[in-house]
Image (cartoon, rainbow, N blue to C red):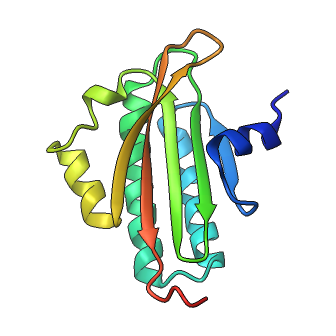
Amino acid sequence: MTDIDSDRAQRSCSERAVELRVTPRLESLAVVRMLVGAIATYEDLDVDTVADLRLAIDELCTQLIRSAAPGAMLTVVIDPHDDHVTIQASAAGDGAGVLTPGSFSWHVLTSLVDDVETFRDGHESNGAGEVFGVTLTTRRADSGR
């Protein structure tokens, strides 16, 4: 069992953060896209921003799934704040080689959101390898929420 509160504290997520862990398979993309779209809509982001976030998470997760190690989990954290929304997606595997600045995927991501950052998060406890991830940030058009 995972202690969600301690995981949230380590990542410094807000109380509104939602985390989804799925097997890294292309069949999982529909669920991830739906969740990101639903939360972005609930958070009152405009229709174009919701569409951009869905495209961005689709591209990001597709690359993470393709490079995921056997036994890895795809983790997606959607963290809405008053002035921005961050989405972290990560999986153990060789994503660092695919999602590099200058690559096609990087260009797609930077075209769809305001900020893109990569991170490494140690090794998965099941021995699947080093966790590689990307944080996407989109700022709200009206921060005076």
Q: Nearer the viewer, residue 61 or 102?
A: 102
Question: Quadrant of residue 49 in the image?
Answer: bottom left
Q: Residue visible at 43% across and 21% down?
A: 93
Reply above or below: 79 against 26. below
Image coordinates of residue 54 in percent, x first then y, are 45, 62
Identity of the residue drawn at 44% across and 37% down: 133
Q: Quadrant of the N terminus?
A: top right
Q: Nearer the viewer, residue 84 or 74?
A: 84
Is 83 situated above or below 70? below
Q: Position of residue 7 (x, y in %)?
A: 72, 38
| Residue drawn where x is 63% and y is 69% of the image | 38
Tell which of 38 and 127 is nearer to you.
127
Q: Is residue 38 above or below residue 22?
A: below
Quadrant of the drawing holding the C terminus: bottom right
Is 44 on the left or on the right of 16, as rendered? left
Quarter of the rendering containing residue 2: top right
Give the camera-side residue of 108 and 117: 117
Residue 127 location (% of width, % of height): 58, 9
Point 47% across, 38% down: residue: 26
